[in-house]
Each structure stands twice: as C-alpha cells, then as structure tokens.
Amino acid sequence: MSHPYVLIARRRSTLQGCYMDEAPLDCCAGEEAMFLGVCGHLEGSHQLHQTGREELREGLRIAAGDDYEPSLEMLQTLGAISDLESSYGRGWSGQMVGSNNWGAITCPGYNKETGTCPPGCSPNKDSSPYSGEYVTCFRRYATPADGAAGLITLLSKWPEVIAAIESGNLDEVSWTMRQRNYYLGFKSDPREAAREHAGALEKRTKEIAEAMGEPLRAWRKGEDWTPGDGDGSSSNLASKVAKGAVVVAFVAAVSAWAFRRK
C-alpha cells in the first residue's frame, strides 16, 4: 500500500498544469482535482460565471428554442441558482462528479440495501432541517447544457417561480421556490429559509453582473412583490418550454407509430 503522501504526489503529477493557483476551469471536471482542492480559487470567479453563462444560454436554446431571448433578470437569476446549487454542475463529489446536474435535481428509486440508483442517476448525500442528513438519487446529464436545460425545464413547471425570476426580485424567487419545496434550506421556518436563500442568490447575482460587465438586474427587492413587476421581456419562457415538450412528445409518438408500421 502506498504511503498517503506518495499517493498525493502521484495525483498531483497526473494533474500537471491543473495544480496551480491559475488552474483552468477544465481541471475541475475530475474527482482527483477535487481531492487536491485545485478548484477552490474558481468559486465566484469571473471565469466560472462567464463559462456558466455560455452553457446556460445553450441550455435555454435546448429547453425553449432558438428564437427565445432571455432577459438579464432571467440570466442572472438562473445563473445564481445554478451556482448556489452546484457551482454550475462542477461542485459535486463522489459518484456525482461529472454528472452535469446544475440544479441538484433528484430522481426516485434509491435502494437502501444496495446503495444504488436507477440508470441515469447516482447516489449522493442531501440534508433536511427536519430529518438531518440522508442519501438520495440525483440525475445525471450528458453535457453542461443538458444539465442547464434540465433545471430550466423543472422551474418552468411552476408559473409563479418563473414570474418571480422574470421580475428580478430574489426575495420572491426564493419564497416561491421554497413553497414548491425545491429546496428546504437550513432553517425550519420556511420564510426564514427563504430569506437566507435570497441572500445567497443576491451575492451571486452581483458576482455575475460584475463578471459579465452588465448592469445588475436581479436583487432583493422586498417581500411585498406582486406579479407584473418584471420587464416582461422573457414572460414566454414557460410557454416556450411547454411547447418544446409537446413537440418532442409528438415526434416521439410519430416515430413510434412509424416503427410499428414497418
């Protein structure tokens, strides 16, 4: 058995240029890099947010179509949610490394006896302010853009969440997401959990705006928000995603019919 320090030295040699203060984003894709902690300097960095923005736009094209143009409110808020949940899919450990799961999206079917999950999913720890730490299954996606699209598709099922995102009011974003149990947070009181969540989102939208050189359009605007406060430029996201899902289902049905006719 190799001495621990020998093992560390070997892992460092395999990473080569990744083991440095200026390690590029690509070095964060593997578990060895996470073991060595070479990705810590990228947290909140311009590089992470800029790459995340490119992948987010591609995810929006997958989910909503090529003709959909998101507002800054939408881009900044979705980016903040993605970064908070998983560092744009790069913050996972263990079997979830390389999963491209942006939104910490779960899937059913965890087998406690074998510690396994259904195909396309992997086990990982989660926590609840009510029951503590537990293990559940999380989805895996082929690419970062697919992971972004998965997050967008899930959020688009809840019109009030999309309306809050479009308004740029992070207080309402966090509150509507908490009401849908998208997250539970660390506070047993839902409103307190939402306030803490909104603060974490605002920290990230400020980082994103600075990284992209754009005006800040998503921040905490108070808990007295009412629908219609947004600029309306991206109000059709939910309908775009829904139409895209209908088209995919229709194509699949036609393909299945054609196959049966052969």
Image (cartoon, helix red, strand yellow):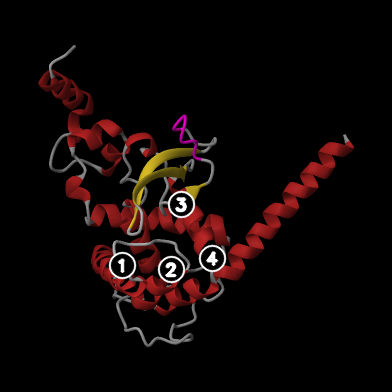
Instruction: Please say whether residue 36 is visible from this viewpoint.
Output: yes
Query: Which comes before the other along the chain, label 1 or label 4?
Result: 4
Residue drawn at x 68%, y 53% as measured from the top left: 248
- Which mark is first along the chain, 4 or 3? 3
Q: Do callouts 1 and 2 mark residues in contact (Cβ within 8 Å)?
A: yes
**Earlier-in-chain disc, 2 versus 4:** 4
Mark 3–mark 4 distance (CA, rounded to whole Å): 14 Å
User: Element at badge 1?
Assistant: helix
Q: Is 111 included in the stretch rendered in magenta?
A: yes
What residue did someone put label 2 on? 177
Residue topped by disc 4: 156
Give whichever of 61, 257 is nearer the camera: 257
How far apart are the two marked residues, 3 and 2, measured between alpha carbons? 13 Å
Whole-number angstrom distance, CA of label 2 to CA of label 4: 11 Å
Q: Amino acid at mark 1?
A: His
Q: Left or right: 28 with respect to 242?
A: left
